[in-house]
């Protein structure tokens, strides 16, 4: 049960999803009726200049609404009043999708959030000598651009196998409003 008193300004709600796969995209295409082949066929996606399939925008958007629907237990404790987002970055197979909603203000029974959905795209893992130990789809297909590097989106961190290179980018920023019943 969620109450207004449970929420504080600057509190962050978070959801992580690491299951973006070609099979999931095919299932979503069938269920949603959005059978645009850029979501399910690498050859068509490449011909469209995408270097490989991309997730449906509404699939990733669904994780934003799910964050609030889970909080409100699907209308049991309140309503989702509004979500407005800008879809700025593509979500790809293998991405870790992290959705965060930060409480910005609380007025009466309404809670206002800043929302951001980020993608973490693994590129490769290198050993201490710079040799590739493991390469991910993003590295194989060239998903990372010079612009990503110039913007400081490409990062490295130490992992047990060596040094992971990955891209971290905000794919979908926005706002949301919920209303709590209590």
Image (cartoon, rainbow, N blue to C red):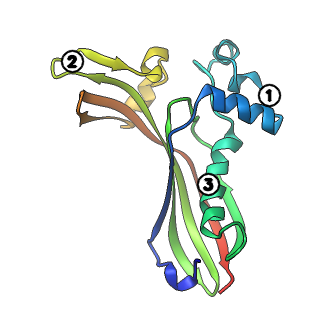
- In the image, is residue 12 above or below residue 15? below
- From mark 3 to mark 2, how far is it between C-alphas? 37 Å
Q: Quadrant of the C terminus?
A: bottom right
Identified at 28% across, 16% down, the residue is 132
Disc 2 on helix, strand or loop?
loop
Number of marks drawn: 3
Q: CA distance from mark 2 to mark 1?
A: 41 Å
In the image: residue 160, left or right of residue 182: left
Q: SS class of the residue under badge 1?
A: loop
Q: Measuring 79% from the left and 37% from the top, which residue is drawn there?
A: 31
Q: Which residue is mark 2?
A: 130
Query: Image quarter for residue 136?
Result: top left
For disc 1, the marked residue is 35
Q: Are marks 2 and 1 in contact (CB under 8 Å)?
A: no
Q: Earlier in the sequence, mark 1 or mark 3?
A: 1
Quadrant of the image containing the N terminus: bottom right
Left or right, 35 with respect to 65, comes to right
Q: Rounded to the nearest whole Å, what is the CA distance between mark 1 and mark 3?
A: 22 Å
How packed mark 2 is, by other alpha carbons closer than 10 Å (few <14, some 14-19, many 20 or more), is few
Crowd class of label 3 (few under 14; some 14 to 19; many from 20; radius 10 Å):
many
Looking at the picture, does residue 36 appear above or below residue 70?
Answer: above
Give the number of the disc on residue 64.
Answer: 3
The residue lying at 63 percent from left, 44 percent from top is: 60
| Mark found first going from the N terminus, 2 or 1 | 1
Query: Where's residue 81, x and y in %?
Result: 72, 70
- At 50% across and 80% down in the image, what residue appears? 6
């Amino acid at each position: 049960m969620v109450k207004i008193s449970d929420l504080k300004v600057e509190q962050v709600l978070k959801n992580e999803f690491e299951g973006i796969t070609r099979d999931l995209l095919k299932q979503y295409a069938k269920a949603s009726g959005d059978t645009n082949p850029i979501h399910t066929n690498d050859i068509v996606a490449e011909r469209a200049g995408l270097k490989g399939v991309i997730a449906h925008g509404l699939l990733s958007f669904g994780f934003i609404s799910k964050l609030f629907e889970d909080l409100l237990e699907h209308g049991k404790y309140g309503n989702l009043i509004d979500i407005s987002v800008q879809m700025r970055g593509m979500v790809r197979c293998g991405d870790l999708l992290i959705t965060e909603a930060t409480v910005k203000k609380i007025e009466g029974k309404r809670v206002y959030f800043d929302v951001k959905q980020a993608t973490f795209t693994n590129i490769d893992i290198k050993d201490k000598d710079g040799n590739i130990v493991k390469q991910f789809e993003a590295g194989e297909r060239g998903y990372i651009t010079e612009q990503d590097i110039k913007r400081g989106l490409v990062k490295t961190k130490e992992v047990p196998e060596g040094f992971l290179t990955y891209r971290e980018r905000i794919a979908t920023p926005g706002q949301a409003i919920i209303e709590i019943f209590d």
